[in-house]
Image (cartoon, helix red, strand yellow):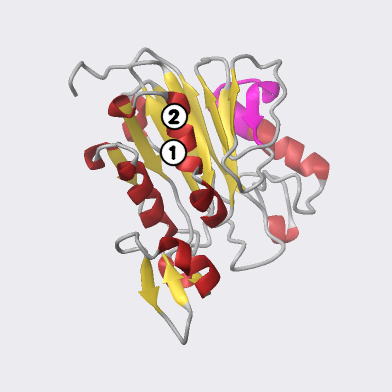
Amino acid sequence: MLVFDDARRLGVDAFVTTRVGGVSDGPYFSLNLGDHVGDDDEHVRENRRRVARAAGVATNHLAILRQVHGREVLELSAPSEVCGAGDALVTSSRELAIAVLVADCVPVLVVNARRGRIGVVHAGWRGLVAGVVAAALERVASVDDVYAFVGPSISAARYQVGPTVADHFVDVPGALHADHGDRKLLDLSRVVEHQLEAAGVAASRIWSCDERTDDDAFFSDRAARPCGRFALVARRHLASTVVAGS
């Protein structure tokens, strides 16, 4: 696991899973958490049980969205609620671990420690265009109190896009780089950081990891199809240690 150590002082246990530690085989080796990619259903269930255990919750207390590449934000307050379709999940509950699945898109954790609310976001290019980051921030409330953690995603060097996609991000500084012909290289993480700052999250409260899905440690849909999915998982655990005005 890749652990977000800085989130712990905000009262949140958060980590990103890697490919290892599960029971899947073939292209899904070994900790695939996606139940929609062709893997054996029982393998996925066992892998999810292991992740729930790592998060300190029962398997049915691990909430995973059915993602649709949009801006829908779901809120859960109890394990009994059904987790439906959307691209961001928000909770104030200490009983739930919430998660989004990725394999090149950007997983984002947002924390409002003062209000005891957390959210996880699946941010691919379609979701970023649709405004999923801003929508999630609205639901965790008061961006002045928000901290954000940007997880592993595909690097710009490996993410070539055509003008149909690139045109959406021409106004984001540092997001696009020249490639062959009309092709561009797109830095999705930079777009996420830009949208967080544009929504009012201070740059000093945004942490971005250096890891990328180009590394074999993570599943990458661009590198191989079919492939599995890894997760960003978060759970509130203690009262925040953030002091007023920090």
In the image, residue 47 above or below residue 32:
above
Amino acid type assigned to the residue bearing label 1 in the image: Ala
Residue 58 located within the stretch drawn in magenta: yes
Could one spot residue 218 in this view of the protein?
Answer: no
In the image, residue 137 above or below residue 117:
below
- Region in magenta: 51-65
Q: Residues within 10 Å of mark 2 (few under 14, many from 20)?
A: few
Q: Residue at x 65, y 34 (%)?
A: 64
Amino acid type assigned to the residue bearing label 2 in the image: Glu
Element type at mark 2: helix
Q: Residue at x 31, y 33 (%)?
A: 6
Q: Which label sits on residue 138?
A: 2
Q: Residues within 10 Å of mark 1 (few under 14, many from 20)?
A: some
Does the residue at mark 1 contact the one at mark 2 (Cβ under 8 Å)? yes
x and y, in percent, of residue 217 in the image:
52, 56
Could one spot residue 26 in this view of the protein?
Answer: yes
Q: Residue at x 81, y 40 (%)?
A: 42
Viewer-proximal residue among 121 and 55: 121
The span from disc 1 to disc 2 (Cα, nearest Å) is 6 Å
Which of the 4 image quadrants contains residue 174?
A: bottom left
Disc 1 marks which residue?
134
Is 42 on the left or on the right of 4, as rendered?
right
In the image, residue 136 above or below residue 11:
below
Element type at mark 1: helix
Which of the 4 image quadrants contains residue 140?
A: top left
